[in-house]
Image (spheres, rainbow, N blue to C red):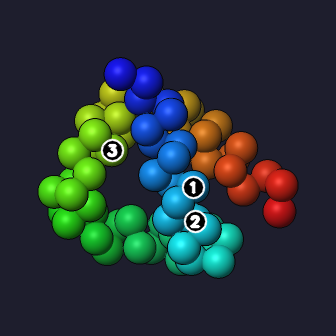
Amino acid sequence: MNYKKIYSNFIESIFEEHNKDIEATISYINTNQAKIYEWKPEFKEAKRHLTAGEKNDIIWKIITPF
């Protein structure tokens, strides 16, 4: 399983849904974490397998163009 791709795709989709607002994206994910884990178990697994540094790199790549 490509955990980086799964994590990146999900974060990017939420980021787009929240009009490219990283604060709103992070808030949404934190507030809805239990629900997200239910309907996106692969995201939960990816999040568990990636290091904090790997997750930060992915988020940085998503928000850097802005």
Q: Is residue 31 above or below residue 6?
A: below
Comes first in the chain, label 3 or label 1: 1
Mark on residue 21?
none
Kindly tell me whether residue 27 is visible in this rendering.
yes
Residue 42 lies in quadrant: top left
Q: Which residue is mark 1?
A: 12
Compared across the picture, whether 28 is left or right of 32 comes to right
Instruction: Tell me which amino acid carries mark 1.
Output: Glu
Name the residue at 35% across, 22% down: 1
Instruction: Tell me which amino acid carries mark 2.
Output: Phe
Relative depth, front residue between 28 and 18: 18
Q: Are marks 2 and 1 in contact (CB under 8 Å)?
A: yes
Measure the alpha-carbon separation of dots 3 and 1. 12 Å
Name the residue at 21% across, 57% down: 39
Compared across the picture, whether 43 is left or right of 37 comes to right
Measure the alpha-carbon separation of dots 2 and 1. 5 Å
Mark 2 crowdedness (10 Å alpha carbons): few <14, some 14-19, many ≥20: many
Q: Look at the numbered disc 2 and give the secondary structure of its residue.
A: helix
Measure the alpha-carbon separation of dots 2 and 3. 15 Å
Q: Position of residue 56 (x, y in %)?
A: 59, 42
Mark on residue 15?
2
Q: Which residue is mark 3?
A: 43
Relative depth, front residue between 35 and 48: 35
Q: Position of residue 35 (x, y in %)?
A: 20, 66
Instruction: Tell me which amino acid carries mark 3.
Output: Phe
Kindly tell me whether residue 23 is visible in this rendering.
no
